[in-house]
Amino acid sequence: MIYTVTLNPSIDYIVRLDEVLVGSVNRMDSDDKFAGGKGINVSRVLKRLGIENTATGFIGGFTGKFIKDTLETEGITYRFVEVDQDTRINVKIKADSETEINGSGPEISNQKLSELKEFLTSLSSKDTVVFAGSSPKNLGNIVYKELIGLTRKTGAQVVCDFEGQTLLDSLEFEPLLVKPNNHELGDIFGVKLENLDQIESYARQILEKGAQHVIISMAGDGALLVTQDGAYFAEPIKGHVKNSVGAGDSMVAGFTGEFVRSGDAVEAFKWGVACGTATTFSDDLATADYIKEIYEKVKVEKI
């Protein structure tokens, strides 16, 4: 079974208007509300690919109910730890430029954290767990080291979608996949990456530190998979960019789902690229039909 862990999920409230006038009343042209959080996004895309999975993490209040209702509607199983404060709301304003206002989320007690730990220690070597996104403020991202460590002791594989120090901290647990973008990779090493050779070189350093597979996403410049067996470049696919929210999560879902199924890293990379690209060209997370359409356009070569 694939499990996704979202410690600080959200309702993503997307507002569209031509421009924002600060200090004035603004009237939106349209809006949408989605169940958000990186792990939640991974669960939703996995389900669209026909891959059963279970979402977990912390959830609470009327906002948490919205997320659970959304997952139930989409046929996704969940095992959340219920907390007594509301799950956060993130406001994403799409106007002449994009602006985000993200909520801080609930405080998590030691008792509730222990409940999640107990669940993770019940897993087995047949499971794969996706850890993604930020942690509630009172826990801090340092909590991931303990949660990932407990999970790995069960024999389960872990996928870690983080930035910066949190990503580096995860490498001691030999994650199945990490997926920084090229800018995040450069920030980790304090360098500006200007070409594919440099990106591959620093991605290999991530491998040397423990990762089993590294995907470097490069927005409109394609993506790179680096493994012990070689490096593989996926050419960018042309299309109208509508949505950057959830594209990376979709890539993680595509890779994880296919790798768990087949164990083929290159084929998993193709599905990751297809999912990420399809979401970029969609208003919400991509549909199964559109992902399959984009998959036929994916071109990967060994470099």
Image (cartoon, grey):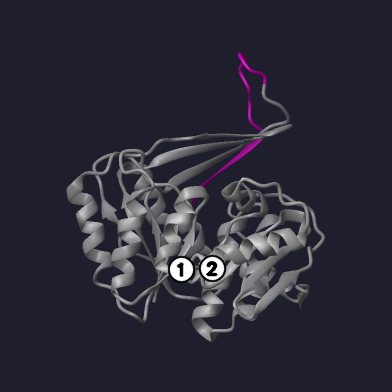
Residue 227 — which label?
none
Q: How many marks?
A: 2
| Residue 142: % across, % down | 36, 48
How far apart are the two marked residues, 1 and 2, measured between alpha carbons? 12 Å
Q: Residue at x 54, y 68 (%)?
A: 208
Amino acid type of the residue tagged 1 in the rendering: Pro
Q: Residue at x 64, y 38 (%)?
A: 30
Q: Residue at x 34, y 70 (%)?
A: 152
The rendered magenta stretch, by its main secondary structure, is classed as loop
Label 2 sits on a secondary structure element that is helix
Residue occupied by mark 2:
208
Q: What is the magenta range?
A: 21-35
Residue 272 sits in quarter: bottom right
Where's the C terminus, which quadrant? bottom right
Where's the N terminus, which quadrant? bottom left
| Residue 229: % across, % down | 63, 81
